[in-house]
């Protein structure tokens, strides 16, 4: 049986997979089982920050694998503590809870936001305002947090206590927060799955000011935008806001599953022994890999991310068949005249792997992709779009 039919027969059919079987890769290059080479402009959905099989990351992971792969959270381990310290030093946040995915990082953020409010104000102040077109995960609670009706079918009952404001409409956030006695506002600064839409700076700062004034927690979902993707270590830095809670995952692990929920001054003491936990959370191997990734996201790399971003915006912004280019850093959405799915297939034929987000073509290349590979990929994309 071919791997394709084996997978189709035995793996739950939750994904519309592309018709290729990948076998290996190096950096921004991936190879299928027929030996065909691809330039990877998707990085496993913003996960492989430094491409695949990056030597430094692989060595960090292997070294830890040979020492200690897992222990329960009843014991201290070095990679977990060091990664938390590094994240706090680089962000100004105060404490970190580790989990295994973006959805879990958001679950933790939601629990912490509600607990903060419960302990300070008692019952009835538990609603969280999220934005329309947002995406926060696939668990029942994070689906409820996701502001898209299409995610709210067939799985009822959902977790209560989420209301959806209009993105870039501060009054809409304020009204909903007041009407529902909200404890938090949770949002992505660039809506990824919702169509790679960057929020207006003014909206973000106005919402942050409103939250701060009313002791409503500001939760920023940086699962996709985080870890260098938008041109700063975390996107919130570029919006000039200070979140109370930041969730992240995807690129943090550089290829292994890890989620992190970071707490600021107001929220650092909210979680206490027994109030939350995760068997695999803070796994030493994942943390050792993540430490390597975060320690390498320096100003030099971020400047490169910005330069590559400008190059893509410039090249595609004026290309035939392109209606608009949106996003930030190396998180880019292209609104095209042709159907995005057709473009994805044509690019794949030509050896370039790209993604979609809603009706857009989406690009999430490795942060350290060479200009040579990037130019090659952009030229193919341009050809396929026109
Ligand atoms: C991908 C994503 C999630 C969910 O992450 P998983 O690791 O798939 O659970 C949550 N929020 C945002 C903004 C995402 O892009």
Image (cartoon, rainbow, N blue to C red):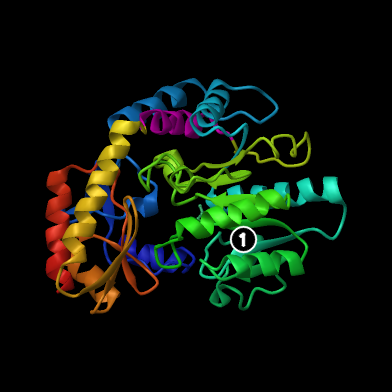
Q: Which residue is labeled 1 in the image?
A: 142
Tell me where residue 12 appears, x and y as whole percent.
49, 66
The residue that appears at 35% across and 74% down in the rendered structure is 359
Kindly tell me whether mark 1's CB lies below 8 Å from ligand 1: yes
Q: Is residue 143 visible?
A: no
Closest to the observer: 323 or 59? 323
Q: Main secondary structure of the magenta part?
A: helix
The residue that appears at 28% across and 50% down in the rendered structure is 365
Give the extent of the magenta segment: 282-296
Tell me where residue 267 appears, x and y as whole percent.
70, 39
Q: Residues within 10 Å of mark 1 (few under 14, many from 20)?
A: many
Quadrant in the rendering for residue 145: bottom right
The residue that appears at 52% across and 28% down in the rendered structure is 83
The C terminus is located in which quarter?
A: bottom left
Looking at the image, residue 252 sits to the left or right of residue 17; the answer is: right
The N terminus is located in which quarter?
A: bottom left
Q: Secondary structure at mark 1?
A: helix
Quadrant in the rendering for residue 33: bottom left
């Amino acid at each position: 049986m071919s791997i394709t039919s084996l997978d189709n027969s035995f793996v739950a059919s939750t994904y519309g997979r592309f018709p290729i079987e990948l076998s290996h890769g190096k950096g921004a290059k991936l190879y299928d089982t027929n030996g065909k080479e691809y330039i990877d402009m998707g990085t496993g959905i913003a996960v492989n920050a430094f491409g695949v099989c990056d030597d430094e990351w692989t060595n960090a992971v292997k070294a830890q694998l040979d020492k200690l792969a897992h222990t329960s959270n009843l014991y201290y381990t070095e990679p977990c503590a060091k990664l938390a310290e590094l994240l706090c030093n680089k962000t100004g946040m105060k404490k970190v809870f580790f989990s295994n995915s973006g959805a879990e990082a958001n679950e933790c953020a939601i629990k912490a936001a509600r607990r903060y409010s419960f302990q300070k104000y008692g019952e009835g102040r538990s609603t969280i305002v999220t934005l329309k077109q947002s995406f926060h995960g696939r668990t029942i609670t994070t689906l409820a947090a996701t502001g898209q009706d299409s995610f709210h079918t067939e799985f009822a009952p959902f977790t209560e206590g989420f209301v959806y404001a209009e993105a870039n409409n501060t009054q809409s956030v304020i009204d909903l927060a007041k009407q529902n006695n909200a404890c938090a506002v949770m949002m992505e600064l660039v809506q990824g799955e919702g169509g790679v839409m960057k929020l207006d700076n003014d909206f973000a700062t106005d919402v942050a000011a409103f939250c701060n004034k009313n002791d409503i927690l500001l939760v920023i979902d940086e699962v996709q935008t985080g870890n260098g993707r938008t041109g700063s270590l975390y996107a919130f830095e570029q919006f000039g806001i200070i979140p109370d809670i930041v969730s992240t995952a995807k690129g943090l692990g550089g290829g292994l599953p890890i989620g992190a929920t970071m707490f600021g001054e107001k929220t650092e003491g909210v979680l206490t022994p027994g109030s939350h936990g995760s068997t695999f959370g803070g796994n030493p191997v994942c943390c050792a890999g993540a430490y390597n990734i975060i320690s390498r996201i320096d100003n030099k790399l971020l400047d490169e991310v910005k330069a590559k971003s400008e190059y893509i915006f410039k090249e595609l912004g004026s290309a035939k068949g392109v209606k608009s280019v949106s996003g930030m850093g190396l998180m880019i959405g292209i609104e095209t005249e042709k159907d995005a799915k057709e473009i994805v297939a044509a690019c794949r034929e030509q050896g370039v792997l790209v993604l979609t987000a809603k009706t857009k073509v989406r690009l999430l290349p490795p942060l350290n992709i060479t200009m040579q590979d990037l130019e090659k990929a952009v030229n193919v994309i341009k050809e396929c779009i026109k």
